[in-house]
Amino acid sequence: MTVCSCSTHTVRWESRLARNGDRWLGVCNECGTMAALTPNTDKPLIEKALTAYLADEDLRPVTPPWLRLFKLSQEEPWPMDWRHYPYECRQCHANVVMTAERRLPATTRTFLLCLNCGHTSSQERRRPPITGSEWAPPCIAVKQLRRAVFFEPFQFLPGFLRGGA
């Protein structure tokens, strides 16, 4: 079984028993490349091989950050009133764009969020929109959306007015 592009292809395999069957980890003697075999795979996993070998469950894909933020923003304590936006995303052309408004102390912002690619738009009234798709590190549009989702309406009041000491 080929694990790497070395000329010798000598791989040392070790196994361990997991909840759902044997897991195998192979290490190339020449270059050190690792590969894992799990009960649900028929070819070696090269990326994240050690994680796949040590995990008791099969690896699930990571949920993109914009979907995690969207889900969080539908529940207390950070609810936003998201509605479907009738036009396609300018970035990926998918028709899964959501829109929401958030009233902030000095302004109201309208946000667009594509659930397919994470493209974000933030716009104040009578100003051009700020757009971006970078979530790590976040671009300005994403930062503004995060601030709006986690906005506490009374955080700018002194402590005794909002119930604190």
Image: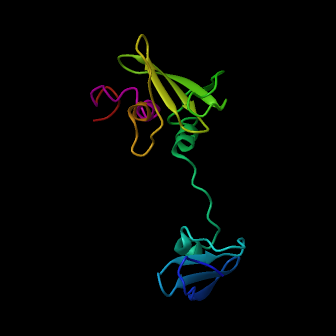
Which quadrant of the structure image shows residue 163? top left
The vertical placement of 30 against 144, above or below, is: below
How would you classify the magenta stretch by its main secondary structure?
loop
Which quadrant of the structure image shows residue 21? bottom right
Magenta stretch bounds: 145-159
Q: Horizontal placement of 75 versus 124: left or right?
A: right
Specify the color scheme: rainbow
Rendering coords of residue 71 (x, y %): 58, 40
The vertical placement of 66 against 111, above or below, is: below
Rendering coords of residue 33 (x, y %): 50, 78
Rendering coords of residue 96 (x, y %): 65, 32
Residue furthest to the front: 7
Quadrant placement of the N terminus: bottom right
Q: Does the magenta segment cover residue 17?
A: no
The vertical placement of 99 against 150, above or below, is: above
Which quadrant of the structure image shows residue 123? top left
Q: How many marks?
A: 0
Residue furthest to the top: 126
Q: Horizontal placement of 61 versus 28: left or right?
A: right
- Residue at 58 percent across and 72 percent down: it is 52
Quadrant placement of the C terminus: top left
- Residue at 50 percent across and 88 percent down: it is 29
Closer to us: 36 or 125: 36
- Residue at 58 percent across and 50 percent down: it is 63
Rendering coords of residue 43 (x, y %): 68, 73
Closer to us: 102 or 45: 45
